[in-house]
Image: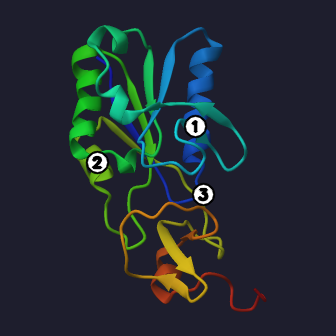
Amino acid sequence: MAKIYFYYGAMGSSKTANALMTHFNYQEVGQNALLVKPSIDTRDGVQTVKSRIGLSHEAVLLEDFVNYTEEQIKSYDCIIVDEVQFATPQQVDFLSDIADFMNVPVVCYGLRADFQNKLFPGSERLITICDEIKELKTVCWCGKKATCNARYNENGIVREGSQVMLGANDSYIALCRYHFKKGMLQNPDIEA
């Protein structure tokens, strides 16, 4: 029986790079994998998945993918979903149906929590129903494990606002819980 996997991590933990490498690994051995992403993620183009280190590949939009027939889906050896935190709980249930009823593994990558340390609905549903969960780790500026996605602007850490605001290094930084709580974006002994 196929499984549904959730690989999560804070910003900068190479989630997208891992998704692209998984896709490449399937292709390299002659397997057919499909790369999928929610349409809300338009940072690098509507149907492009791109990592911060420059890897990129075309993707199918999740909103279109949910309309694929069972025959179309079964033509793939694996479904790989990037930015899965933006999926709805219903879309996550659809992904689990692919593993359960079509015997096609589904590998999901995304953030667990937002800039207020609240679960994204898609991530919450995945945590509830997926077969395997694994954290992809990254570090805070202090060297400790980063677990928080801090949104910031010219005034420092932003604590209120819409759950979804697309951005990268220009508006988000991964911090350990301590420095997130303290609102410390960097070592105070280092000039900005």
Q: Where is the N terminus found, in terms of image quarters?
A: top left
The amino acid marked with disc number 3 is Gly
Mark 3 Cα-neighbour bin, 10 Å: few <14, some 14–19, many ≥20: many
Question: Which residue is at the front of the view, 44 or 81?
Answer: 44
Front tag of 2 and 1: 1
Instruction: Return the disc, 2 or 3, that comes first in the chain's sequence.
Output: 3
Q: Percent x, y for residue 95?
A: 29, 30
**Residue lying farthest to the front in this orientation:** 46
Rounded to the nearest angstrom, the CA distance separating label 3 from label 1 is 18 Å
Rounded to the nearest angstrom, the CA distance separating label 2 from label 3 is 20 Å
Q: Residue 12 carries which label?
A: 3
The amino acid marked with disc number 2 is Ile
Q: Mark 1 points at which residue?
A: 48
Kindly identify the residue that appears in the image at 32 percent across and 57 percent down.
Answer: 120
SS class, disc 3? loop
Q: Residue 72 carries which label?
A: none
Q: Mark 2 points at which residue?
A: 127
Q: Is residue 177 above or below residue 37?
A: below
Q: Percent x, y for residue 186?
A: 66, 82
Q: Where is the C terminus found, in terms of image quarters?
A: bottom right
Among the 4 quarters of the image, the one containing residue 48: top right
Q: Percent x, y for residue 31?
A: 54, 11
